[in-house]
Image: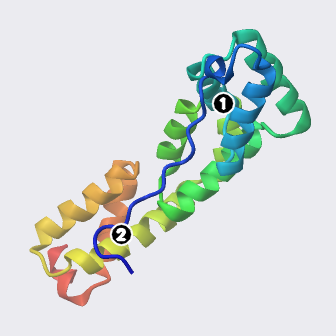
Amino acid sequence: MADGPRRRRRPAQEPPAQAAGPDADPMAVAREIALRRLTMRDHSRQELDEKLAAKDVPDEVRTELLDRFEELGLVNDAHFAEQWTRARRTSRKLSGYAVRRELQSKGVDREVIDQTLEPIDHQAEVELATELARKKWRQVHQLPREVAYRRMAGALARKGYGPAVVSEVVREVMQGDPDEASFW
């Protein structure tokens, strides 16, 4: 093994559509760029459109290609939203609100977002926040109560949880520790 920090491999950079040569078919270049992106992970239509625009793919080519990809099922914002939501809530423990913001920034339609996030109710938010708070509690339980409370509340707030969920969860987790019961 080599000593030193590990270097992260950068994904291959796509050339601009114009750099592929004057004789290159813009549709073929656009298709290659989009397929390369889709092999890494699912993308929303807007994300792919922005990537293609950044590579100087003409508007009409982008529209035609993305329409065709939607027909083939390669681009599907509803599927993308479901996958993104599942991944972000599982790995990062993000609140429904935080996932909504991310999906909006990726250009997913509001109706699709609403439908995707509909199953997330208050109880689901509390359960996920509790899981995150318990993990944080293991790191801060030795600190003064007020500091521990602030750190746990801050961690939950940064994940997008609202004040009602934060206070409910942090109090529950801290009360679960017999040494902290006197705090309340």
Q: Which mark is residue 133?
A: 2
Q: Which residue is mark 1?
A: 48
Residue at the image position 57 percent from the left and 44 percent from the top? 12
Cα separation, mark 1 vs mark 2, equals 36 Å
Q: Considering the numbered disc 2 on the image, is that residue within a helix, a strand or a loop?
A: helix
- Characterize the local packing of mark 2: few (<14), some (14-19) or many (20 or more) Cα atoms within 10 angstroms: many
Residue type, numbered disc 1: Leu
In the rendered view, tell whether residue 30 sits above or below residue 89: above
Q: Nearer the viewer, residue 31 or 134?
A: 31
Could you tell me the amino acid type at mark 2?
Answer: Ala
Q: Position of residue 170 (x, y in %)?
A: 31, 67
How dense is the environment of label 1, judged by Cα within 10 Å: few (below 14), some, or many (20 and up)? many
Question: Horizontally, is 124 left or right of 35 in the view?
Answer: left
Q: Is residue 140 left or right of residue 120?
A: left
Q: Identify the residue at image location x=80%, y=19%.
A: 25
Q: Is residue 118 visible?
A: no
Q: Which mark is residue 5?
A: none
Mark 1 or 2: in front is 1
**Mark 1 or mark 2: whose residue is earlier in sequence:** 1
Query: Residue 28 lies in what quarter of the image?
Result: top right
Picture residue at 57% right of the left edge, 33% below the top: 106
Q: Is residue 70 visible?
A: yes
Name the quadrant of the N terminus.
bottom left
Q: Residue at x 56, y 32 (%)?
A: 104
- The C terminus lies in which quarter of the figure? bottom left
Q: Position of residue 9 (x, y in %)?
A: 48, 56
